[in-house]
Image: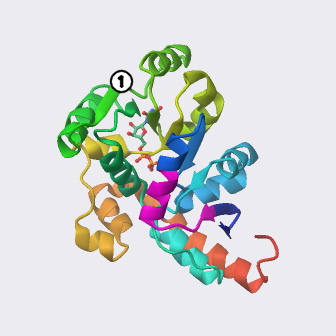
Amino acid sequence: MRIDVLGVSFDNVTLDEAVDRGLELLELDGPHWVVTPNPEIVQRANQDPEFSEILSNADLVIPDGVGIIYAAKILGRPLKGRVPGIDFASALLERIAGTGKRLFLLGAAPGVAEQAAVNLQLAHPGLNVCGIHDGYFMEDAPVIDAIRTAKADIVFVCLGSPKQEKWIAANGDSAGARLYIGLGGALDVFAGKVRRAPEVFQKLGLEWLYRLIKEPSRIGRMVKLPLFLVSAVGAKLKGNKST
Ligand code: UDP
């Protein structure tokens, strides 16, 4: 069952349930896709009907970000918990390592996906990284070709949102993989270029605060978070009529 949070419907899953669903999707003919919306993405979907439709057509919609969890609670439809995209990706890789499933990494600046591939293979022995491509390309065709030629089963698409979701919707079928996952800045984290918040910040749901301290330029993006929660309160007061 999906739970609507201000116009985007989320799967009410734990991390383990999300990974099980991801593994099921990997056994089906593609393309299937997973999206990992945070409050910023929900707000964007409200302003972009095409993007909103792409999100609703995803096969798995997981709540990446504590703001989604708070908003769901305010709306009186609580979700089981936060499933950060990066944790979902890591847990999925742990399960597919050694199975022969082929992973393609798409996105980030040149050189980043290469480093991410090295680190991921160290972290998950037996992981089959079948190809990589940076995220700063002018034409889609060579990228589609690279994924198809690599016979990828699963593609991490890390182009930032909404670019990555739109790319998957437009090109997932031609590229021939079974499962696409939109993961924003995950390759920068896997490559060790961006450090994730220490566990204490993660446990307290304060990853956003750590990120803000490290990258103060994100303040413009982050002031939207309180507004998001205010919208949830507004929707609740209106009796959720529009959500
Ligand atoms: N990126 C890319 N191609 C682009 C724009 C962005 O590959 O045309 C990459 C960028 O290098 C970064 C990621 O997309 O690795 C976006 O990171 P951000 O943290 O902004 O994503 P979010 O998770 O916040 O959407």
Residue 83 visible in the current orientation: no
Q: Is residue 126 left or right of residue 150?
A: left
Percent position of residue 91, x then y: 35, 54
Quadrant (top left/top right/bottom left/bottom right) for the C terminus: bottom right
> Magenta span covers which residues?
10-22
Percent position of residue 210, x then y: 30, 65
Is 74 contained in the magenta span?
no
Question: Mainly helix, strand or loop, the magenta region?
Answer: helix
Q: Secondary structure at mark 1?
A: strand
Q: Is residue 123 left or right of residue 220?
A: left
Q: Quadrant of ligand 1?
A: top left
Above or below 9: residue 119:
above
Residue pointed to by mark 1 = 131
Is 19 contained in the magenta span?
yes
Quadrant (top left/top right/bottom left/bottom right) for the N terminus: bottom right
| Residue at left offset 43%, top offset 63% | 15
Figure colour scheme: rainbow
| Residue at left offset 54%, top offset 69% | 68
Above or below 76: residue 109:
above
Q: Quadrant of residue 224?
A: bottom right
Using the image as rendered, state which of residue 153 and residue 183 is in the foreground.
153
* Kind of residue at disc 1: Gly
| Residue at left offset 34%, top offset 45% | 93
Respond yes or no on whether mark 1 lies under 8 Å from ligand 1: no
